[in-house]
Image (cartoon, coloured by chain):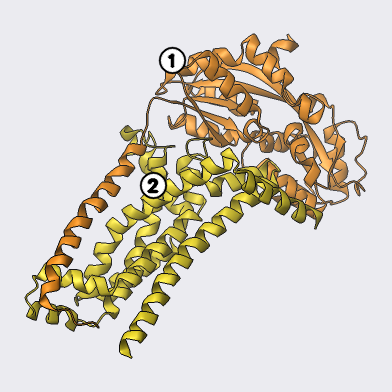
Amino acid sequence: MRFRPPDSFPGLRDRFRARLPILCAALIAFASCARADELILASTTSTVDSGLLDELIPAFADDHASTRVKVIGVGSGEAMALGRRGDADILLVHSPVDEAAFMAAGHGGRRLPVMSNDYVIAGPPDDPAGIRGAGTAALALARIAARDAPFVSRGDSSGTHRKEMALWAAAGPRPRGYTEVGQGMGEALTIASERGAYILSDRGTYLALSHNLRLEVLVEGDPLLENPYSVITVRGARHAAAADTFADWLVSPRAAELIRAFGIERFGEPLFHPSGSLR
Amino acid sequence: MDLFIESLREAVRLLLRGDRYVLEVVLLSLRVSGTAVLLGVALGLPVGIAVGLRQFRGRGLVIALIHTGFALPPVVVGLFVYMMLSRAGPAGQLEMLFTPAAMVVAQAVLAAPYVAGISLAAVQAVPGDIRLQASALGASPLLALWMHLREARLGIGAAVVAGFGAVISEVGAVMMVGGNIAGETRVMTTAIVLETRRGNFATAFAMGLILLALAFAVNAALTRAQQGRTLAAERRTW
């Protein structure tokens, strides 16, 4: 401990006083972070992870400078929970049965078909359960179950998880190697790859990650594997008018063109097909 | 192994190029976690000082509770703050959910126990007679306290650094209350999660390297201050 002569106190006191306002100012600075009046879009992870929304949102901003869209990437189940609590203004989801329930319960305003892509069943290249070319998803899953081959499930109430459960319900009992990982599509694909397991994935996420995966697409093209996406405006949302504007834009020819073109450069094929083009 | 080397090489390239996306994310991380730690200091330091200086009944319990705060899981704090700020929650009117302010609140709650617990130990380690001595030499009680805290300042610095380290590296709370919105609430840890999911391992790895480098820089500065002071004290003794 150092000895301080009394005459050094005034200097210390001044320094003490000089530093107080700096601390106070710094504490007040954080208050400037808050912002309001922005549209919150809860969107499925596949549209975020694939990069589709990175294309669509700036284009929408060009057309509608007054509206800012903030994207939260969550599973379809969680997105609808956000909508029910009023924490999201608009949803982009792919879980038709749950969407119908959401609308029936009066949580939604409008529900419009936006686009679709498809699911694939991927698995290890050596295909121990022999599902390659099985033709239908139900037959493929039945073979996986018969061999008790490992199968990785999202297990997170996402649209993909719901679809998978519906497919299992049609195919019969699940294999002993069935694992629920409770994570997003990317994580689930990585786990399946490391474990040499089969998995149901949307095509877009599979293609985006395929260079890091030891998985091949083994079953595709079954009509049951179609994956439609809808936009739903939340009834009583904070920014209801902006949500309507965005929903209308999302099904406009301009958005359809962007959706159709997305992914061709990177993957050699489009990842999503705008619904308008099917009609 | 190829994957690892390629990711490392690409990460270094991104860092050297000063990639704008990476830079934005790093700056937001610093802003959010820095503000959170300031707030955590405002909450935790007075508690740490008060408990460190005073004897009272139940003091042991208070200290145990503060130390339990070290083990607060970020997702639980995130969930709690989410429920408070949700439109269906008590503070929904603030419209703070999915903003940097919400992330600051959650991280401040996480940082406060670190600041309180470690500053408590630092304040307690300073011999109490320094205040007696200062008072005897004519200092006011406030100034005497200030002198006591000056002696504990490196320990208090360590408390702030520990709080910063805890919050800059957490992902559970900021993901939940921030939503990982591009350009708004995307910080280093949530960007690492997203880029990993997207298969952009190099970008994720680059962020991880920056995170480590930041943690190292902060700790190196503290260590330098601590060691420098010890050496100076030794020189004075001789």
Image coords of residue A38 (percent x, y): 43, 25
The residue under the point 14% across, 64% down is: A13
Image coords of residue A40 (percent x, y): 48, 28
B40, A151: nearer the viewer: B40
Specify the quadrant of the image occupied by residue A34.
top left
Image coords of residue B104 (percent x, y): 39, 47
Quarter occupied by the C terminus of chain A = top right
Q: Is residue A183 visible?
A: no
The residue under the point 93% across, 44% down is: A130
Task: Give the colour of chain B.
Answer: yellow
Task: Give the colour of chain A.
Answer: orange
Above or below for B21 versus A234: below
Check disc 1 and report the residue beneath it: A241
Amino acid carrying mark 2 in the image? Val
| Mark 1: secondary structure | helix
Check disc 2 and report the residue beneath it: B104
Chain identity of mark 2: B
Q: Image check: A247 left or right of B157?
A: right
A266, A40: nearer the viewer: A266
- Crowding at mark 1 (Cα within 10 Å: few <14, some 14-19, many 20+): few
